[in-house]
Amino acid sequence: MTEPTYARPETLEEALLFLKRHGPHTRPLAGGTDVMVDLRSGKLKAPYLLDISRLPELQGISMSEEGLSIGAGVTISEIHSSPLVAEHAPSLIKSCAFFGSLQIRNVATMGGNVGNASPSADTAPALLVHGAEAVLAGAAGARRVPVENLFEGPYRSGLKSHELMLRFILKPARGMFSDFQKIGRRKALAIARMSMAILAESAGDGTFRFVRLALGSATPTPMRVRALESFLAGKRPDRKTLDDGAVLMAEEMVRITGRRPSTIYKEKAVQGLFLRMLYPLLENGAV
């Protein structure tokens, strides 16, 4: 196996110029938690590795008029320990808490987690319920893309070969009801078999003003379940509403994926995950 050529640009401009010349043959390297596995297994075929881990444009967590900004090169541990993220996107904090081991969280980046386009990307459902957009840079300029659109298929990203992911912009949701839940083969250090995130706001009378709900791993790509969001909007979270919502969630999952041998398990699992997240509202009687 021929080892790839390693390059480490000093500036973003150098990195984008390199990708303009060698993009289709280059694999960006930040945390390396996926790249190094592929390299050791022989699956990495790219002749170039581009180390972008030290580019300042990919770092930092801040709040502005745009929203909550998180650099694509920020590690999962940095996100998990951020007071700003805890205040405005607690479901993302929870998804980071379930993310691999401490050692992995210390080096893995959110840009890598999204860029790998895995259906089981832990941060994806939380990003989707916050309406997150990714800021992408290329030699010709920058563009903003909804994170949901970056997942074009299992392990197939909408990121172009000449582009780099700079940061994510989330709609902040201070004080709203939110949660993230995940099912794996075991309680820790497990790839998600199914994950779900929710963000909901009260209308002030105990009903939902709006609901955003995203599903991961159980579908070919992480995605918002918009039929369920529409069903819940304007309703009070009583037992019948939640039970009916759980059934609708399972129906939507099957509609998207089709029936498979695992469907008999996943139908019950997705209903249980949905109810586990929303039962606290049932107990309180309001959003």
Image: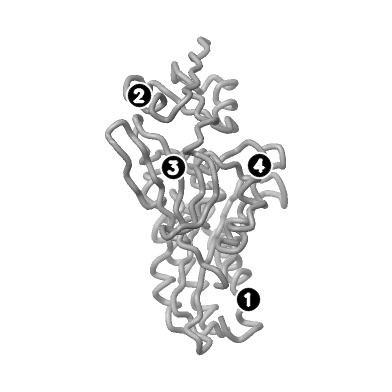
Circles 2 and 3, Cβ within 8 Å, touching? The answer is no
What residue appears at the point 35 percent right and 24 percent down from the top-left corner? 17
Comes first in the chain, label 2 or label 3 = 2
Give the class, few, some or many, for how many residues have Cα within 10 Å of label 4's Cα (few <14, many ≥20). many
What residue appears at the point 47 percent right and 28 percent down from the top-left corner? 28
Distance from disc 4 to disc 2, alpha carbons, whole Å, reads: 30 Å
Q: Which mark is residue 17?
A: 2
What residue appears at the point 63 percent right and 69 percent down from the top-left corner? 276
Disc nearest the viewer among 1 and 2: 2
Establish if 168 lies above or below 250: above
Give the class, few, some or many, for how many residues have Cα within 10 Å of label 3's Cα (few <14, many ≥20). some
Which residue in the protein does label 3 denote?
154
Circles 1 and 2, Cβ within 8 Å, touching? The answer is no
Disc nearest the viewer among 4 and 2: 2
Circle 2: element type = helix
Comes first in the chain, label 4 or label 2 = 2
* Type of amino acid at the residue the image marks with label 4: Arg
Q: Which mark is residue 105?
A: 4
How was the colour assigned to the protein in this rendering? one colour
Distance from disc 1 to disc 2, alpha carbons, whole Å, reads: 51 Å
What residue appears at the point 35 percent right and 49 percent down from the top-left corner? 145
Disc nearest the viewer among 3 and 4: 4
Q: Which mark is residue 279?
A: 1
